[in-house]
Image: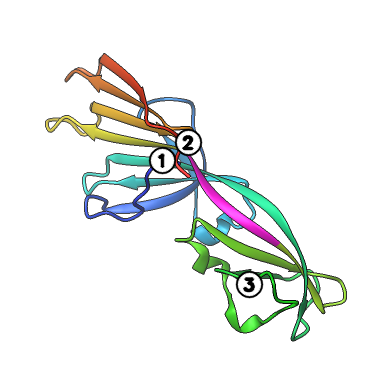
Amino acid sequence: MPSETLLNSEFHTCQYYKTWVTYSIPMKPSNPVDYKDTEFLQSFYLACYSDKKQLIKFTKYLIDIESVGEKLLYTAKLPSSRIYFSDLDLTNLHVTLETAIEYKDTKNFHSYYMGIVADTGETVRLNKIRRRIFFVDNYTYWDDSTDRLKERVMEKEEGTIIKFIYDQKGNKIDETKFFIGKHN
């Protein structure tokens, strides 16, 4: 998985998006959403901008869902409601709601648990959610321009890194590709 730093001193602001417009470099994200609105998406994007409003980092997230079974609830809950946990002891027969968190609190977790309360309200079907980074694009710009790229570094999930160098007119002048291995 590519490296990730959501908030870094070089970022002025970061925004989540549902998608991006036609393939161009730098990427052009569209359909901005709050993090809470990513709850039901299978993929989404995070774009981070410099104080000059230049896109400096563009990350695509994919969501993997793994069923981990059904557990009893100590306290009945409204059927079909969702419950989130940062971590669970799956050896326990019951799930306590005292450790539940809200979806918005999963923002900085790479994995967490999501449960859907069954029709009886007394059991919960649990899934482990793993948020993985499919790719990250990092951009740097020429000092004299707000829209001309100097460098693009793309890190892919499988461990490939591609570095593109641009001249001051925005023309690609070099491309280097190397493989660092898949991150676990």
Name the residue type under label 3. Answer: Asp
Q: Is residue 69 left or right of residue 109?
A: right
- Which of disc 1 and disc 3 is earlier in sequence? 1
Q: Quadrant of residue 58?
A: top left
Between 139 and 72, which is closer to the camera in this rendering?
72
Give the prevailing secondary structure in the magenta stretch. Answer: strand
Q: Please identify, in this view, whether the residue under mark 3 or under mark 1 is nearer the observer.
A: 3
Judging by the rendered image, the residue that carries numbered circle 2 is 157
Q: Position of residue 65 (x, y in %)?
A: 67, 51
Q: Residue furthest left?
A: 144
Q: How is the image coloured?
A: rainbow
Residue 78: percent from left, percent from top = 78, 78
Q: CA distance from mark 2 to mark 3?
A: 29 Å
139 to 50, vertically: above or below: above
Pointer 1 residue: 2
| Whole-number angstrom distance, CA of label 3 to CA of label 1 | 28 Å
- Residue at 61% from the left image edge and 71% from the top image edge: 88
